[in-house]
Amino acid sequence: MWVFGYGSLIWRPAIPFEDEVVADLAGYARRFWQGSTDHRGVPGAPGRVVTLVEDPRAQCRGRAFEVPEKMVSRVVAQLDHREQGGYDRLMVPLEAADGRRLEAAVYLATADNPNWLGPASADAIADQVLRSHGPSGSNTEYVLELDRALDEIGALDPHVHAVAEAVRVRMGR
């Protein structure tokens, strides 16, 4: 089984895997439109984390992890718990950087979940991010680590970069 990471799984997978590869998912864009009340924020003061939204012109670059066969049920249970704040699991086709075609599990949140925050400007998202902190740490860390990790894998994501830059400006960096 393969798992596609496009958010914190890129820089903090925290799952056992026997192989990993940079991969692209066609038809989806990464957006900070999901609220986090269990990891990067709290109820009443959610952080903002990424989800995928359908966009036929988009391509989302991330990392795909191959889970050892004997660990699949444990990893699925672990990820179902980690992504419980409004995310659904589905299977998607990926194109790996090495040319392989993979089918992978991916977790994404849609507008019909209770933690959905929807679109906002990079400045508004940055303001919310700077105020948010949850059991997994600061929302600022999430944004900046994601931006760094995307740069490391050669992923050009204008939305994530704009939010990260707005956060850095507000922090005086």
Image (cartoon, rainbow, N blue to C red):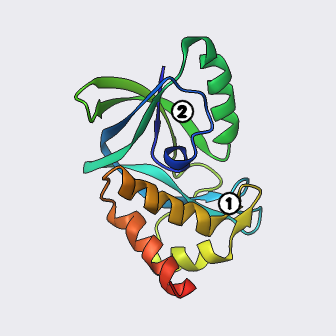
Q: Quadrant of residue 136?
A: bottom right
The residue at the point 52 percent across, 49 percent down is 11
Q: Are marks 1 and 2 in contact (CB under 8 Å)?
A: no
Residue linked to disc 1: 40
* Residue beneath the point at 63% across and 34% down: 79
The residue located at (61%, 11%) in the rendering is 70
Is the residue 54 above or below the residue 127 in the image?
A: above
- Residue 95 lies, with reference to residue 44, above or below; the image says above
Horizontal side, residue 98 vs residue 86: left or right: left
Q: x and y percent of residue 170 in the render?
A: 54, 86
Report the residue at 52% width, 52% height from top. 111
Q: Nearer the viewer, residue 109 or 7?
A: 7
| Residue on which the image places disc 2 | 89
Q: Earlier in the sequence, mark 1 or mark 2?
A: 1
Q: Nearer the viewer, residue 88 or 68?
A: 68
Q: Position of residue 65 (x, y in %)?
A: 47, 30
Amino acid marked by disc 1: Arg
